[in-house]
Every structure is written in C-alpha cells, then in structure tokens.
Image (spheres, helix red, strand yellow):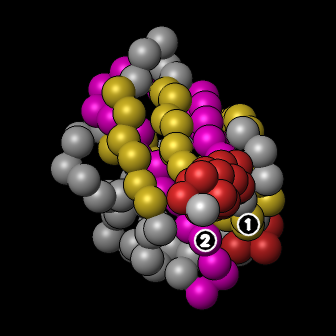
Amino acid sequence: MTKIIAITMLFICSFISAQNVKLTVSISGLKNNTGVVKVGLYNSEGTFLKTVYKSLASEIKNDKAVVTFENLPAGEYAISTYHDENNNGKLDRNAMGIPSEDYAASNNAKGFMGPPSYNDAKFVINKDSKIEITL
C-alpha cells in the first residue's frame, strides 16, 4: 500500500513540476554599461505597471543584459524593463513626468502619450521560452 501511495505522490509531483517553465529575457539596445537593467514580470492586466509579480535585475555587458525567471506557472505574462543608469532602484522622470531613463515592454509594445497597454505587451508561455526586448 505504501508503494502505491509513494508512486502516486511521485506522479503528482512530476505533473506539477512539468507545469513550471523558465523564461529568459534578453534586453538589447542599451546605450552604455552603466548601472543595471531592472525587469518586472506581470501576470495580469489589473497589476500591469502597478504591482510586479516577480522582478530581477541584471548587470550590463556589451550594452546587453539577460535575466531568467525560473519555476513560473505556465500562463499569460507581460514584461516592463528599464535601464537604471544611476542605480537608484527607480525609473527616473523629468519635471513633466516623462521617463528620463530608457524603458521598454515585451513585444516591444509602445504606448501613445503614455505607457504601453497590457494587451499589447502580453504573451503566453507554456514551455521554456526566450524573448527579446529592445530599448
């Protein structure tokens, strides 16, 4: 009986872990190697650009950066990233509220007179994936 329970639990654990994926994000187009790149991962339209689901930072090499999100549930996501040149942990803005540091979103989505929409930036992953974003 314990063998059956152990095999069943092993099967369930392998099924659950099979639902987790890895997402590698490559960011290019950085104008220098100063500071870091911050990458925010969002898992819903309601939280996009408000409450990050997961975030990572990466050093910059040769005007490029790469981050990898591990153990993500398969599903729909969007990314927002920026070049934190002065390494102060926030996207700096000028007096008009316009970002003074370079930023971008997944699908290289652009906003008109504001940030991009979740619908333009969203993507679905159901296996290990890699996406590229250009600042």
Callout 1 touching callout 2 (CB < 8 Å): yes
Residue 14: % across, % down: 65, 49
Residue 84 located left or right of residue 18? left
**Residue 36, percent across and down?**
33, 35
State how far apart marks 1 and 2 are (Cα). Answer: 6 Å
Q: Quadrant of residue 46?
A: bottom right
Which three-letter amino acid code belongs to the residue tagged 2?
Answer: Asn
Choose between 130 and 82: the one closer to the eye.
130
- 89 and 128: which is toward the camera: 128
- Label 1 sits on what residue type? Glu
Lateral position of residue 134 relative to residue 34, left or right: right
Q: What residue is drawn where x is 36% and y is 41%?
A: 57
Seen at 61% across and 36% down, the residue is: 24
Residue that protrudes farthest toward the left in the picture: 88
- The earlier-in-sequence mark between 1 and 2 is 2
Measured as percent of width and height from the top left, residue 34 is found at 31, 26
The residue that disc 1 covers is 76
Q: Is residue 84 magenta?
A: no
* 55 left or right, relative to 18: left
Question: Which image quadrant: the N terminus?
Answer: bottom right
**Total count of labels:** 2
Circle 1 Cα neighbour tier, 10 Å, few/some/many (<14 / 14–19 / ≥20): some
Q: Secondary structure at mark 2?
A: loop
For the question of whether residue 128 can be seen, the reply is yes
Q: Position of residue 79 (x, y in %)?
A: 60, 57
Q: Which residue is mark 2?
A: 43
Secondary structure, mark 1, is strand
Q: Is residue 127 left or right of residue 36?
A: right
Magenta highlight on residue 44: yes
- Span of residues in magenta: 20-46
